[in-house]
Structure formats: structure tokens, C-alpha cells
Image (spheres, rainbow, N blue to C red):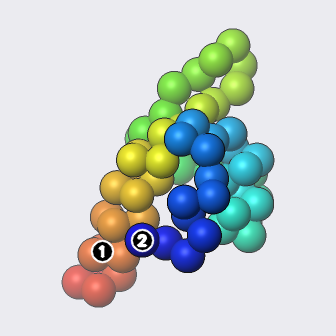
Amino acid sequence: MIFGFEDLPDIVTVKQLADYFNTSGQTISRALKNSELKGFKVGREWRISKEAVLQWVKRNSEAKENG
């Protein structure tokens, strides 16, 4: 499990995820737009499930290990 990950809500916003990973909202938005990270929109704003975040992290970790 990612450190402190259990403290995040089950559904997170782009800002919450960017703050958690200490990155920009633009980085998270780009991953969503490129379908690297799965999410859904509520109005104009993205929402991401914790499960989708875990899958995204796992795929990125495996890609870095293999590449």
C-alpha cells in the first residue's frame, strides 16, 4: 500500500491527488486526458477512484522496472 494512501477518500479530485503525489494538477489532468489514469467527470471536474490510482501507480512502477 502507498504510504498514507488509506487516508485519502475513496474518490479523489485532481487537486487532492496532485497534493498527495506532490505534483501539479496539470500532470494528473494530462494522465487522465491520455487515458493513462482512469477517471470520470462530474460537471467539468475529474474524479478518480482509489482503485484507479493504485492501478496507475502499479502500471507506472512496472514500466519503470522493465524499461
Distance of label 2 from label 1 (alpha carbons)? 18 Å
User: Is residue 4 left or right of 49 when viewed as pictured?
Assistant: right
Q: Please state which amino acid type lies under the numbered disc 2.
A: Met
Q: Please state which amino acid type lies under the numbered disc 1.
A: Ala
User: Is residue 40 left or right of 65 when viewed as pictured?
Assistant: right
Q: Write the residue at 71% across / 57% down.
A: 18
Q: Write the residue at 71% across / 19% down.
A: 44
Indicate whether 15 appears above or below 54: above
Question: Which residue is under mark 1?
Answer: 63
Q: Write the residue at 60% across / 70% down.
A: 4
Q: Do the residues labelled 2 and 1 touch (CB within 8 Å)?
A: no
Q: What element carries label 2?
A: loop
The first of marks 2 and 1 along the sequence is 2
What is the x, y in percent for residue 10?
53, 41
Look at the image and tell me whether residue 29 can be seen.
Answer: no
Look at the image and tell me whether residue 7 can be seen.
Answer: yes
Residue found at the very far top of the displayed protein: 43
The 10 Å Cα crowd at callout 1, few under 14, some 14 to 19, many 20 or more, is few
Residue 54, picture quadrant: bottom left
Q: Using the image, tell me which numbered label, if any, was put on residue 20.
A: none
The 10 Å Cα crowd at callout 2, few under 14, some 14 to 19, many 20 or more, is few
Q: What element carries label 1?
A: helix
Indicate whether 55 appears above or below 51: below
Question: Which residue is under mark 2?
Answer: 1
User: Is residue 40 left or right of 44 when viewed as pictured?
Assistant: left
Q: Write the residue at 23% across / 83% down.
A: 66
